[in-house]
């Protein structure tokens, strides 16, 4: 029978070889921390495991003498929140160095919701040496994580040649060399006092030629954004991705596409659903923006895209559909405008918001109403990602010769 044991603090002897797995936790409430530690003990029974928490430790139920945990004082104060930040990556690598583990898991907010099986799979990927970076594939509802589905996933897949479904995952498995690389990138932020800066592990791994494994993770409670304002979220997340694309341009212009998959075709019969979500507010926001932001959009988008938006603004809700090719061009042109500073970057990201809402309205209409909206939604996202891949030469050409393609 399992007994309650007090967690022992571990120390690494200088000169000893790295061994075992280190799990680095971000701040958690006491009850959530206790539940997380219990899940970790169950997931890695019999495996040397060290757990680092910034919070005071509760007793833990464990039979394994190889299970140890300790509190740590962050080397770079973490701002907390809903995403992993530069401070989290810097702290993880320093803990790896200090405590002599060969690899680590970095678990984000609300880690208590991660099942032991998911934790075990994520850890096994890096413990086995088969991956430098292990990323989860979360099981989310078809209406969850839409910023990821609309922008982060298809753009990262096409530009960097990777297939990680959640490139900004909040749980990661890291080899020592991957943790070191991310810590080096993080230090540029923390040294400038930007501890909340975002890193993009998937693109960093791609640039460094490191191996990436995607792990089926099941369901997980994802923390809500710090701000519920969509403009703020897009500026923070999409803006960070655009900056990452700019910083790694020398790599991705040479990177090969990962597949030649053709987008799936959807007949109008398939996308006409009897039960539609309320997309009217999103459409009204888009149509209002079409009137008020047309001048700004004309500085960013070429005439063909503007013509496509004009047609969209006149579509009734029952048949509203944004073509995947149009959305891919919009995202690519906004990435280019971000690089060229065509307009103030804050205004640029604000001008993207109503276009994103138009995509969401189209996506929800496409994937809702049959009782099988999950598969329909995922099919659409995968088809759209293939369109992003196919259109990558447009981004490369405009990046290299922007004047040739002036709207």
Image (cartoon, rainbow, N blue to C red):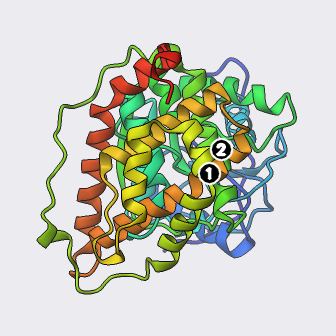
Residue 195 appears anywhere in the view: yes
From the viewer's perspective, tell me whether residue 5 is left or right of residue 355.
right
Residue in the picture at 43% in, 82% down: 278
In this orientation, which residue lies closer to the viewer: 204 or 285?
Answer: 285
Q: How many marks?
A: 2
In this orientation, which residue lies closer to the viewer: 115 or 359?
Answer: 359
State the image coordinates of residue 124 (x, y, percent, origin top left). 39, 43
Residue in the picture at 69% in, 75% down: 31
Which structural element holds mark 2? helix
Say above or below: 312 vs 70: below
State the image coordinates of residue 88 (x, y, percent, origin top left). 70, 43
From the viewer's perspective, tell me whether residue 372 is left or right of residue 65.
left
Which structural element holds mark 1? helix
Q: Which mark is residue 348?
A: 2
In this orientation, which residue lies closer to the viewer: 115 or 7?
Answer: 115
Q: Which mark is residue 366?
A: none
Give the crowd class for mark 2: few <14, some 14-19, many >=20 residues within 10 Å.
many
Identify the image quadrant of residue 232: bottom right
User: Residues at badges 1 and 2 in contact (C-beta under 8 Å)?
Assistant: yes
In this orientation, which residue lies closer to the viewer: 300 or 253?
Answer: 300
Q: Which residue is mark 1?
A: 351
Give the crowd class for mark 1: few <14, some 14-19, many >=20 residues within 10 Å.
many
Q: Residue furthest bottom?
A: 275
Residue 117 appears anywhere in the view: no
Say above or below: 159 vs 154: above
State the image coordinates of residue 262 (x, y, percent, origin top left). 16, 40
Residue in the picture at 63% in, 62% down: 230
Could you give the CA–CA distance between mark 1 and mark 2, rounded to whole angstroms? 5 Å
Say above or below: 98 vs 362: above
Residue in the picture at 63% in, 36% down: 199
From the viewer's perspective, tell me whether residue 364 is left or right of residue 11.
left
């Amino acid at each position: 029978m399992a007994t309650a044991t007090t967690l022992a603090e571990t120390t690494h002897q200088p000169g000893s070889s790295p061994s075992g797995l280190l799990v680095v936790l971000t701040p958690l409430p006491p009850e959530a921390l206790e539940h997380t530690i219990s899940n970790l003990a169950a997931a890695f029974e019999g495996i040397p495991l060290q757990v680092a928490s910034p919070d005071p430790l509760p007793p833990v139920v464990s039979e394994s003498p190889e299970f140890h945990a300790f509190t740590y004082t962050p080397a770079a104060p973490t701002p907390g929140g809903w995403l992993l930040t530069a401070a989290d990556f810097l702290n993880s690598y320093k803990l790896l160095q200090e405590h002599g583990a060969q690899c680590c898991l970095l678990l984000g907010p609300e880690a208590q919701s991660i099942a032991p099986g998911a934790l075990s799979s994520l850890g096994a990927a890096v413990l086995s040496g088969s991956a430098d970076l292990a990323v989860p594939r979360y099981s989310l509802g078809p209406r969850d994580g839409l910023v990821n589905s609309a922008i982060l996933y298809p753009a990262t897949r096409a530009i960097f040649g990777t297939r990680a479904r959640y490139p900004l995952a909040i749980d990661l498995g890291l080899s020592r060399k991957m943790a070191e690389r991310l810590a080096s990138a993080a230090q540029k932020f923390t040294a400038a006092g930007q501890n909340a800066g975002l890193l993009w592990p998937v693109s960093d791994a791609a640039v460094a030629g490191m191996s990436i494994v995607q792990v089926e993770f099941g369901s997980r409670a994802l923390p809500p954004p710090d701000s519920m304002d969509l403009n703020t979220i897009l500026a923070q997340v999409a803006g960070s991705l655009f900056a990452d694309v700019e910083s790694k341009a020398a790599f991705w212009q040479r990177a090969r596409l990962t597949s030649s998959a053709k987008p799936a075709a959807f007949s109008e019969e398939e996308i006409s659903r009897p039960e539609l979500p309320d997309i009217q507010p999103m459409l009204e926001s888009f149509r209002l923006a079409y009137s008020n932001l047309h001048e700004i959009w004309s500085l960013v988008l070429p005439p063909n895209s503007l013509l496509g938006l004009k047609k969209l603004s006149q579509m009734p809700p029952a048949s509203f559909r944004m073509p995947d090719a149009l959305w891919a061009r919009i995202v690519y042109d906004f990435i280019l405008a971000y690089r060229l500073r065509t307009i103030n970057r804050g205004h640029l990201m604000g001008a993207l918001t109503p276009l994103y809402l138009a995509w969401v309205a189209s996506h929800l209409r496409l994937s809702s109403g049959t009782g099988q909206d999950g598969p329909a939604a995922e099919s659409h996202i995968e088809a759209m990602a293939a369109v992003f891949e196919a259109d990558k030469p447009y981004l490369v050409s405009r990046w290299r010769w922007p004047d040739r393609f002036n709207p």
